[in-house]
Amino acid sequence: MTHPFRASLAAPDRTVLPGLCDAHLHVYWLGEQITRQCDVSDVRDFPQLFDRLQAFAAERPTGYLIARGLDDQALREHRLPYADELDAHFPHRPVILIRRCGHIGILNAAVRHLLPAATPDARGRIEEHAFWEVLRSLPKPTDAELDAAALAALRLARSRGLTAVGTILEQPRQLASLVRLRLAGLLPVRVTAHPPGDCLLDLHKVGMLTGFGDPWLRIGAVKYFADGTFGARTAWLEDDYTDAPGQRGQDLFSASNLAQHFQTAHSLGFQIAVHAIGDAAVRAVAHALAPLCDGHNPRRHRIEHVSLCPDDVLEVLARNRIVAVVQPQFVPSDSWLEQRLGPRVKHAYRFRALLDAGVPLALSSDCPVEPIDPLATLAAATTGNPWNRDGALTHDQAVHAYTHGANFAAHADTEREALPDATVLDHATRTLTAYVDSSAP
Ligand SMILES: [Zn+2]
């Protein structure tokens, strides 16, 4: 069923798609990175890293210097810098390095002096909740800075060919920022906002529910974390990391009493979204969500990442129609995964197996963990992975999961499919252009 507007865009050298929707990214992380932080995602060794930091520090001589996107696996040194290496270059300026995954930070001595409650190890390294507490304790951006960050990120999303995004929120002020942008008519793409789980009762008190809003801005799921990441070795595994005997990652599921939180969120009318990467995390979350799904999961509870999924867990997801929100670009980025997981790697990134089993599938970038690059996302989704045969989607399946699938995960499929929004692929230039209908109120 093609909308007349979409039909009008057709031309021999173009493919007209329904508007692409990225189901899971972080608008405020990305926006802060663009507007206020030093991007080090492309540096390849320590000298280049320190040059980049020095240049940034010269441009912005005061305040915290925050560098984001560092990928130790891509560095010639194959590790993150230690705090004393940062201190040698920045003895007085507080510097925070954030690993690509966002789950590990390195704090130099000047930061530890300003934030004595922070508890990094001897090398300055701090992980997961303890690290996020550090980030939360930094000077807060003003409302204007928040709005500018969101606009920068959302404009980038539109320029890359997206017409809609689902954004994970880290704090409630970000929701107020999105509401301001909506009221000012400034949102460049349609947004579903997924507030953090610890906002649940506040949202409930003011009568908020999943689905509240309009076609430009809606409240989506409340978001929880069941574990960390493979890169940080904090993803929660059923058996030890192959390259780190004795370590199985972090069980945030039990630590945060998530099963109880799911019950509450569900009974208050919310959709639930849970970060789960390791097999133990995916299993625990699948079994905790299953009783809330009533067989067909009308609330569309979803698991973000579903990175390591043994057959019997996949079966639980399929039987309960639990939505899988996956990030195909993780596959090329996690090229080292077999060293970390050993033979279990055969259960990693099984996009096709999930879909074939009947699991509703949505694609996303998790930007800024990966760049917003829809063609790269689709290419990775159709390439699959080197570890199993059930990883690759067909081209049509990938596009469907990046349009209908992502909108379905946001409860927005019916609404958005009635709109003329479109993404046009120009074959000659390999570029995407987003058309977002602004005639609707
Ligand atoms: Zn994320």
Image (cartoon, rainbow, N blue to C red):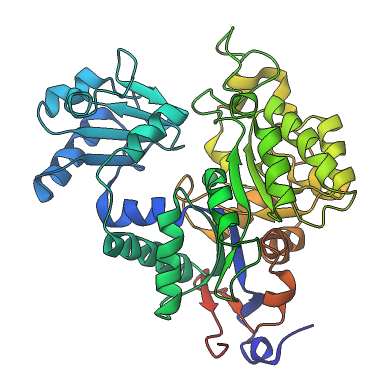
- Looking at the image, residue 312 lies above or below residue 24: above
> Furthest-top residue in view?
246
36 relative to 424 in the view: left or right: left
**Relative to the observer, which residue lies in front, 420 or 136?**
136
Q: Which residue, as the protein is rendered here, is positioned at the far front? A: 205
Residue 38 point in image, percent of width and height: 26, 46
Give residue 23's quadrant in the image.
bottom right
Which one is in front, 83 or 259?
A: 259
Q: Is residue 180 above or below residue 311?
A: below
Q: How many marks?
A: 0
Whether 136 is drawn above or below 214: the answer is above
Q: Is residue 370 visible?
A: yes
* Percent x, y of residue 85: 20, 21
Please state the horizontal and vertical placement of residue 248, each as a whole percent of the image.
61, 16
Question: What's the residue at 49%, 47% (across, down)?
Answer: 370
- Find residue 171 and report its horizontal and vertical position in percent: 44, 50
In front here: 272 or 373? 272
In the displayed structure, 307 sits above or below 251; it is below
At 40% from the left and 71% from the top, the residue drawn is: 180
Q: Quadrant of the C terminus?
A: bottom right
Q: Residue at x 72, y 66 (%)?
A: 404
**Visible residue check, residue 307:** no
Point out the image quarter for the N terminus. Answer: bottom right
Residue 134, picture quadrant: top left
